[in-house]
Image: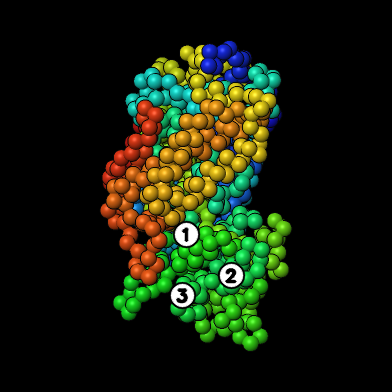
């Protein structure tokens, strides 16, 4: 389906695919944005706004399928420069907070900090309801891995509100949206890139599968898009894990760029934490701070027991750990058993280990808001507040949460958190939440420069979670800030190139058009007469091919293997076995066929998942082989971890970035030093004159 008020008529071109002639439609735009979350919508909107005559389109597997539309937490956080109160803050301070997370490039941290206020205020002006006081200050709170009160929130659905506001702006500009188009291949050519671009290939288009178009041009639904700029905004590697809080509707598109040779970095660094499984949602913040009861059962619901007592010596330490899990939500090996001057401290991440062990033993695990922990109850079932440490008690008191039951405390402190589950058919007043340890966010991704252009493929921009701008730790909510800042910088760079081309005689390779219904000559794909051979998988249709159930069974097998060894518990021997099995599955993939064009797209997703898993597993193995230990949000184990002793935390790689790319059919890895935070020019007259010269003023 093409969403646009203007008619868009493609050119029909004949290509060779594995030696056979095939006719495919070719749509040509100056800029193609792949993905329709907060990053993709913002970039498309800004490219159209900043480039007067350039054409832009969005190509998406599903307009409402991504993480931005479908995930959140108790109060989903947006991280920005402090805009309230009397506490000093600065771009430099915020950049340092991002940089101090470890394995983070300082130039990118500075960009993310410097652009935060512009990006945030743009969302405000588009109507995203961030709260402010009577004087216009945008009140904030402190989030994890931060030293200020930079965090803000619209409640559980912050990113959903962002996408709705951005989509409205996109539609007002009549930016065409190709909805239901699964991109399966990045097209590049090897001409000499621009002087200001990275060395390597140049992106010039994409191939997509659009099953609804099957039969119109070819029986497979293959569609080609020609573009001078490709913006990749497809989110994280969502479907590579079985235990995940990514929405089921979002799959994985990293494999497309990995197969094209795009450099990636810090693929080792993901966040994992507790989430509900019936409806996928992060259980952070207020969900933990109201101190719910944790228990597990046998698969049939029998043998109920409160298992956290196996990990904590007394109820006071157990309550403290659960409370802290609210703002220490991601698993952190440094928050297991901590060596203190007066003995061992019991950290909040022991709760994660306890849940994981119960699940691994075949039991089902629940958070229950209907009752307090049994040994924290008074005679009438209320919570004995005398058992709380000062931090938890003060927080509950100040938040109006000194009610008897967890559900009453949640209603008093954050009633939208209850309504969220009710809107998905779950009543926290009458039923518990089944939970698991889940993958939630990849801090790594593809390597980009300060304009969010790929480190080694020119004219390819990568924004949102797909961009590898974070390292070991990141402040909560910084991912949403990154969606807006990265897409802003990419859009500005695309517009700047367009302006330079219009003002010079050397505009070869740029294809600026003013009418969408007058598709231009295909200057971005002048020599393309044959589609890449590996697209042949998408044309394998057979009556005895795989049906949807068989394809999904394979996908689940891949995901379970990854969760078992490449999530927050990582054993080198198991990773080696998984790498071998993944390579074997990729080798046999050519033998698979699908029963129809719709299932060809599903098969393409399976291959993408396998390629992505292989890259991630290879990066993890390389890190461990280089001496890497537990850090961030994962444990490196050799057998069962010793939970009664402090966990060795990696320090040797704190100032290094792990890079990986496909070369001659194999993933190769290397470590390099992080880029420091740049020394920069801030004397106004110099900045002013440099800006005028760059922008031709």
Q: Is residue 524 above or below residue 675?
A: above
Mark 1 or 3: in front is 3
Q: Is residue 264 above or below residue 419?
A: above
Q: Kindly identify which residue carries mark 1.
A: 330
Q: How much space separates mark 1 and mark 3, taking CA atoms?
A: 19 Å
| Secondary structure of residue under mark 3 | loop
Residue drawn at x 45%, y 23% is 188
Quarter of the image that includes the N terminus? top right
Q: How much space separates mark 2 and mark 3, taking CA atoms?
A: 14 Å
Where is residue 275 shown, x and y percent of the image? 56, 58
State whether residue 93 appears in this view: no
Where is residue 107 shown, x and y percent of the image? 34, 44
Q: Kindly identify which residue carries mark 2.
A: 295
Where is residue 313 shown, x and y percent of the image? 45, 78
Q: Does label 1 or label 3 sit earlier along the sequence?
A: 3
Q: How much space separates mark 1 and mark 2, taking CA atoms?
A: 20 Å
Q: Does label 2 or label 3 sit earlier along the sequence?
A: 2
Q: Residue furthest bottom?
A: 379
């Amino acid at each position: 389906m093409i969403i646009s008020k203007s008619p868009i008529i493609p050119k029909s071109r004949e290509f060779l695919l594995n030696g056979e002639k095939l006719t495919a439609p070719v749509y040509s735009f100056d800029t193609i944005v792949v993905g329709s979350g907060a990053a993709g919508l913002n970039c498309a909107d800004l490219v159209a706004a900043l480039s007067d005559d350039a054409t832009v389109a969005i190509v998406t597997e599903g307009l409402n399928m991504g993480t931005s539309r479908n995930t959140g937490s108790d109060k989903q956080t947006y991280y920005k420069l402090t805009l309230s109160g009397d506490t000093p803050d600065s771009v430099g301070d915020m950049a340092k907070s991002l940089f101090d997370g470890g394995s983070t490039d300082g130039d990118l941290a500075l960009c993310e900090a410097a652009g935060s206020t512009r990006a945030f205020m743009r969302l405000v002006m588009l109507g995203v309801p961030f709260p402010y006081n009577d004087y216009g200050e945008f009140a904030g709170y402190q989030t994890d891995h931060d030293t200020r009160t930079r965090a803000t929130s619209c409640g559980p659905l912050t990113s959903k509100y962002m996408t709705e506001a951005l989509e409205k702006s996109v539609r007002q500009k009549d930016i065409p949206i190709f909805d239901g188009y699964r991109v399966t291949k990045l097209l590049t050519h090897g001409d000499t890139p621009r002087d200001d671009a990275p060395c390597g290939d140049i992106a010039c288009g994409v191939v997509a599968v659009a099953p609804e178009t099957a039969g119109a041009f070819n029986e497979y639904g293959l569609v080609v898009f020609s573009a001078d700029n490709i913006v990749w905004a497809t989110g994280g590697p969502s479907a590579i894990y079985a235990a995940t809080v990514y929405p089921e509707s979002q799959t994985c598109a990293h494999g497309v760029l990995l197969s094209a040779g795009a450099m990636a970095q810090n693929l080792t660094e993901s966040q994992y934490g507790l989430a509900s499984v019936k409806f996928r949602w992060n259980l952070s913040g207020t969900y933990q701070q109201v101190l719910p009861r944790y228990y597990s059962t046998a698969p049939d619901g029998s043998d109920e027991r409160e298992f956290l007592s196996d990990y904590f010596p007394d109820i006071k330490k157990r309550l403290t750990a659960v409370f802290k899990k609210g703002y220490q939500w991601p698993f952190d090996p440094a928050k297991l058993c901590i060596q203190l001057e007066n003995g061992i401290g019991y950290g909040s991440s022991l709760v994660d280990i306890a849940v994981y062990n119960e699940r691994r033993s075949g039991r089902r695990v629940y958070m229950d808001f209907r009752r307090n922990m049994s040994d924290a109850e008074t005679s009438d079932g209320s919570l004995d507040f005398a058992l709380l440490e000062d931090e938890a008690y003060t927080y509950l008191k100040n938040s109006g949460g000194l009610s008897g039951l967890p559900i009453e405390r949640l209603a008093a402190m954050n009633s939208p958190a209850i309504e969220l589950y009710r809107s998905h058919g779950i009543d926290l007043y009458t039923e518990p939440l089944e939970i698991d340890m889940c993958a939630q966010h990849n801090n790594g991704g593809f390597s980009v420069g300060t304009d969010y252009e790929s480190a080694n493929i020119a004219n390819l921009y990568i924004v949102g979670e797909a961009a590898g701008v974070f390292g070991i730790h990141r402040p909560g909510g910084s991912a949403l800030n990154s969606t807006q800042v990265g897409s802003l910088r990419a859009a500005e760079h695309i517009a700047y190139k367009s302006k330079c081309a219009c003002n010079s005689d050397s505009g070869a390779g740029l294809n600026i058009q003013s009418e969408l219904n007058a598709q231009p000559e295909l200057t971005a794909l002048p020599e393309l007469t044959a589609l890449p051979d590996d697209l042949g998988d998408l044309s394998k249709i057979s009556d005895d091919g795989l049906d949807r159930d068989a394809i999904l069974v394979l996908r689940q097998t891949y995901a379970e293997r990854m969760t078992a060894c490449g999530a927050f518990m990582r054993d080198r021997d198991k990773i080696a076995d998984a790498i071998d099995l993944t390579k074997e599955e990729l080798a046999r993939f050519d033998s698979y066929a699908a029963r129809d064009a719709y299932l060809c797209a599903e098969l393409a997703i399976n291959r993408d998942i396998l390629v992505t898993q292989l890259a991630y597993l290879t990066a993890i193995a390389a890190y461990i082989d280089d001496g890497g230990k537990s850090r961030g949000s994962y444990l490196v184990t050799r057998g069962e971890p010793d939970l009664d002793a402090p966990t060795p935390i990696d320090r040797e790689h704190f100032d290094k970035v792990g890079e990986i790319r496909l070369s001659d059919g194999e993933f190769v890895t290397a470590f390099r030093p992080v880029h420091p935070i740049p020394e920069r020019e801030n004397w106004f007259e110099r900045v002013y004159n440099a800006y005028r010269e760059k922008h031709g003023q």
